[in-house]
Image: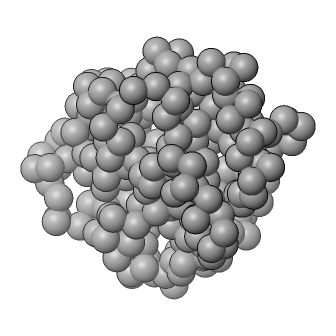
Amino acid sequence: MATRPENSRGSSAEGSGEVCTHLAWDSDFFGLRIARLNCSRLDEATVAAARGWCAAQRVDCLYFLADSDHAKTLSLAEHHGFQLTDVRMTFEQNPVSPASRTDDSRSIRMAREDDLPALREIAGRTHRDTRFYFDPHFDRAKCDRLYETWIENSYRGYAQAVLVAEAENVPAAYLTCHRKGSETQIGLLGVSQAHQGKGLGMQLVTRFLDWSYEQKATRASVVTQGRNLAAQRLYQRNGFVTASVQLWYHRWFTG
């Protein structure tokens, strides 16, 4: 199972003053010109401006995160060739004292340098519900490497903490913890295929909530995919509730 904090690796799309923002990290990684639309709703003028900007910047793929409750936006997106790739679900809760929870997360520890080969292997195999795998324009081997790179970068400082669950003395699952101000967020959660269904995800999320409480967070959140029912159930069992539902689109300008 996987979750992804959007805008985590590229340039921020907010406050740029332009209709779109070029995403340098994504572009370099995939070997394509990739950008993001800097709004969540469409009208004809916005579509025209975005198409003009993308033509001038020679963009191959434009990401668009849309409000799911705005009918005109969804109609325009479909009419203008945007491909629906994901339903983005955000779950939230207010962290509470660890004393109020009963799940045993004592086997969870912080990641170490020597965990990285195992964590990269898990990451390259367990995030197949995300929008990059769903879009056939992206090479699947590169998608594997995307998450391998993501978990290593998280350990090397992108995340504030990386939690590891062991099974038979080897890393079997991980969760990355992020903090911004008084809020915390789960970044990636991955469980190896051999150890799914054994409660490791539950233990990791419990420990994340403990960490959030230790960080004095007033809100904890996580993003997952609409097609990832197992992740949704996991978060709901841990007290998370749905905060928002958005739609990810990709608009390709190449064949």
Residue found at x 35% / y 31%: 138
> Which quadrant of the figure contains the C terminus?
top left
> Image quadrant of residue 66?
bottom right
> Which quadrant of the figure contains the N terminus?
bottom left
The x, y position of residue 185, in whole percent, is: 59, 56
Rendered view: 232 above or below 168: below
> Image quadrant of residue 125?
top left
Q: Can I make out residue 90 in this image?
A: no
The x, y position of residue 150, in whole percent, is: 45, 32
Tell me: 32 left or right of 66: left
The x, y position of residue 105, in whole percent, is: 36, 64
Report the front residue among 13 and 123.
Answer: 13
Tell me: 20 left or right of 18: left
Residue found at x 23% / y 67%: 199
> Image quadrant of residue 12?
top right
The x, y position of residue 72, in whole percent, is: 66, 69
Rendered view: 134 above or below 240: above
Residue found at x 34% / y 76%: 233
Look at the image and name its color scheme: one colour
